[in-house]
Amino acid sequence: MNDDRQPPTTWHALKPPESRPNRRFMLKAAVGSGAVLLAGGPSATQAAKALLDEYKPVYFSGAEWAFVRAACARLIPSGGDGPGAIEAQVPVFIDRQMAGDFGKGSDWFMGGPHDPNADPQRGFQSPLAPAQIYREAIAAVDGWCTLNKGKPFAVLDEAAQDEVLKTLQAGQLGLRAELRDFFTFLLQNTKEGFLADPMYGGNHQMVGWKHIGFPGARGAYLEWANDQGKPYPLGPVAISGERG
Amino acid sequence: MARQEKKTDAVIVGLGWTGSILAMELAEAGLQVLALERGEDRDTVPDFAYPRMIDELKYGIRLKLMNRPADSTLTIRRSLQETALPYRVLGSFLPGNGVGGAGVHWNGHTWRALPEELRLRSYVTEKFGAKVIGPDLTIADWGVTYDELEPYFDRFEYVCGISGQAGNLGGQTQAGGNPFEGPRKRAYPLPPLPTLLNGKMFGDAAKAMGYHPFPLPSANLSDTWTNEYGMQLGPCNFCGFCERFGCINYSKSAPQTCILGALKHKPNFSYRTRAEVIRVELSADRKTATGVTYVDDQGEEVFQPADLVILAAYQFYNVHLLLLSGIGKPYVAETGEGVVGKNYAYQMSGGTSLFFKNVNFNPFVGAGSSAMVIDDFSMNQVDFGREGFIGGSYISSGQFNGRPIASMPLPPGTPAWGAGWKQGIKDWYGHSMSIGSHGSNMSCRDCYLDLDPTYRNKYGQPKLRMTFDWKPNDIRMTQFMRSKIEAIARSMNPTHWASGYKGEGAHYDVRPYQTTHNVGGAIMGTDPTQSAVNRYLQSWDVHNVFVMGSSAFPQNLQYNPTGTVGALAYWSARAIRQDYLKNPRPLA
C-alpha cells in the first residue's frame, strides 16, 4: 500500500452551499475565477505566452519546445470564441506527459519483433515509445519544413503551419513507419491537455472546462437527475479544490 | 526448484467477481480457501476515494486500473493466414487487474441471458431449420437451461442490489419492464434509477413506434441495500465516473462492496496479491490437479498445493492457463478438433448520435447504467429465416458520463482541430445523445484462441493468440439494427445526426474501444468432444479444476455478460458444495 496518500476528502466539502444554485454562490464563483487569462482576447494570450516562457521543459529541447508550442497553438488556436491551447498551457501538459509513463510507454508491451508497417487497424506496432516518437518526428518535420519552406515549423506563418499539419495528418510528410502515429499522439495529447484536470499542467485555471461547461470533479449530481433540460449553473472544481 | 507453500483445500486463481463468489461459497462450506491475485490489492478507501478517483486522464484515458500490456497481453490476427501481432496498447477491450478485477470498473449493466440464448442451436434448428445455420457457424447449446439458472440469476441480483423493473414475473407481463425477458420468480431488489432526459426522449419516441421501453437493469443502486452477507451499499449519486473507475460512493455492486468486506472476516479465507499463477500442476495420470505454480512479488516461483483449483481469472487468462497446463485438448481450426480455445467470440455494437441545438442534456449527470432500452429486436424476437442472420441486439439510449476528453461527439463535418473544432466543442458539448445497439456475436470455426508461435511472456511462456474477424452474419445483424435505430432517430427530429455501424467487408480494428465482453475458449456443454467444461464448469479432463467466467460461453449473448457470469458462478458453486465435495469425481 502507498503510505503517501492524502487522507480522502469527502465530496461534501466541495458541494455548493445549497443543492440549488443561489445568486450569492454564483457571484462568488465568478469573482473568484482567474482574472487575467479568462478575460480573453490578445492580452490574455500575451499573459499565457509569458507564463509559458517562464516554464522550464523537463523533456523537450529548445527547438522541440518551440515546435510543440507552435503546433498546439494551431491545433486549438487562441483566436475566436474562447481560449486556446496556449491559454490552457497545453505545451506544459505535453512536456510533463513525455517525462512520465505515457512518454516512456511504461504500460505498453514494447517487446519485439516489431512490424511498424502493419495495417494501422492492428494497432500501435512501433518499437519507439511516444517520447522518442515526438523527438524523432519533430526533427523530421522541422527538416521537411526547412527543406520545403525555408525555415523550421515554429517560425512559419500560421497558414503555412496549418498546411504542414494537414500534410502530416494525411500521412504525406514522408515520416518513416516507426513515427507514423506522431500526429495522432500530438492531437490527442493536445486535447487531453485542454480538458484534463489542471494538476497535469494544462487546462490552466480550468479554461477548457469553462469553455464547454463541464463542472470538473464535482462528482455528485443526484439532485439533477430528475431535473434535466435546464443549463447547469455551477462552474467547475478541480481535484485540488480550485474553483472556477 | 520452486518454493512450496502449505497445502490448502481450495486455491482460487483471480479475485474478481467469480473468484470472490467461489471463495465465499467454499469458505462457507468450511474449506480452507486461498485466493491468488496477480494484481494489487484495492479497496474503496483509499484506492477509489474522492476526489482522486474523479480523474479522467489517469483512469479514463491512461487506464490505470486495467491490466497493463507491459505485464501481460496477447497477440491478435484476423485470419488463419495472417501473422499475429501483439496487442501492445489497450484499445478494443480492457481486461481488469487487481483485487475486484473488472468488477471494480464496469458500468453495471446486469442482464440475464434469454432462455433461447442458452439453447441457441436447438432454438434456431427447431424454429427456423438447421439450414439457417451456416457451415462455419459453430454455435451450440450451453448444457444448462434458463429454468435451471433462474435461482442463480436471482441470487446474484440480490447480492448486488440490482435496480430495475421486472417485465415478466412468473409468466405475467409487467408494465414498464422488458416483456421479452425470461420469467423471473420475484422483482428486482430495488426500483430503477431515475430516467434522464435522453432516456425519456428515446422512450417516448420508441413507444410512439410501438416498441416497449424499459429502464436498463443497473448495478448502480437506486437506494440503500444490505445483502445476504451484511454488506451495505448506498444510492448512486450520478457522478459520471463509473466505467473505468472505482466507485467513490459504495453505490456500484462490485466484489469489494458486495462480498469481499465480509469474506475477509472469515478465518478460513486468505488471499495473496502480486501472485501470478503461471501453471496448474497435474498428477502423474493427469486426471487431477495437485495445485498451482505462481510467481510471487519477489519473482520467485512458488508451488501451492491444493485439492481443488478454481480458475477465476479474466476469460483470456483462464484459457491461457488451460493451454499452458495441458488441460484438455487444444482446438485446431483447420480440423475442427479439440476444445480448448474453441469459439472465441466478441460482440457487435453500433450507434447513432443525435444532436439537438436547443436541448441541455447535462451529460456529466450520469450513472454507468442510466439508460432506457428496447428489446423488440432481441434474439427471441428476430425472424432469422427472413432476415438472413442469426443474432439480436438490445437498443438503448444511455447517459453514462460527460467526461470531455473521450465523450465529445460532434456533428458530421466538424473539423478534428483548429478554430472549427474549438467552436464545435463549445456549441455541441452537452447537446447530444446517442442510441446504440448492443448485439450478439456468433461463434465461428476460425475464431479461436491458441498459443502464439513467436511472442513470449515475461516467464518465457508463449503468449495467447487470438484469431478473430467480423463475419457477414454479424454485419448483416448490425445493418438490420441500424435500420431500426435510424428510423427512431429520424422520428425525434434532431438538428443533426450521425451513424457508426460496421459495413460489408469491415475488419476487426483493435484500436477503438468496443467492448470488454470477450467470451469463449473454455466453453461449456454436454459433449466432451465439443466443449472444454461440463455443465457445472468442471473440466472434462481434470475433475478438480473448475473454470469460471465468460470463457464458458459457447457464443456471445446480445447482453452484457456479468449477470450470466455471476449466475453460472453460483450454479457451479452449488454443484461443488452439494455434490462434488462429498465425492470428488467427474459430475457429468
Image (cartoon, coloured by chain):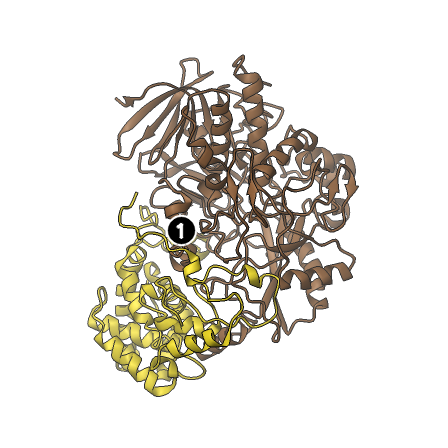
Chain colours: A yellow, B brown
Near-viewer residue (B537 or B252): B252
Residue found at x 71% / y 39%: B182
Which of the 4 image quadrants contains residue B131?
top right
Q: In this view, does B18 lie to the left or right of A7?
A: right
Q: Mark 1 points at which residue?
A: B49
Q: In this view, does B457 lie above or below B109?
A: above
Tell me where residue A103 appears, x and y as whole percent.
29, 58
What's the amino acid at mark 1? Ala
Residue found at x 54% / y 28%: B339
Tell me where residue B193 appears, x and y as whole percent.
61, 53
Tell me where residue B473 appears, x and y as whole percent.
65, 47
Tell me where residue A130 appears, x and y as whole percent.
31, 59
Q: Can residue B263 be seen in this view?
A: yes
Q: Is residue A221 left or right of residue A163?
A: right
Q: In which quarter of the image is the N terminus of chain B?
A: top left
Q: In this view, does B401 lie above or below B152?
A: below
Label 1: few (<14), some or many (≥20) within 10 Å? many
Q: Is mark 1 on a helix, strand or loop?
A: loop
Residue found at x 70% / y 31%: B147
Which of the 4 image quadrants contains residue B583?
top right
Near-viewer residue (B541 or B310): B310
Residue found at x 60% / y 39%: B157
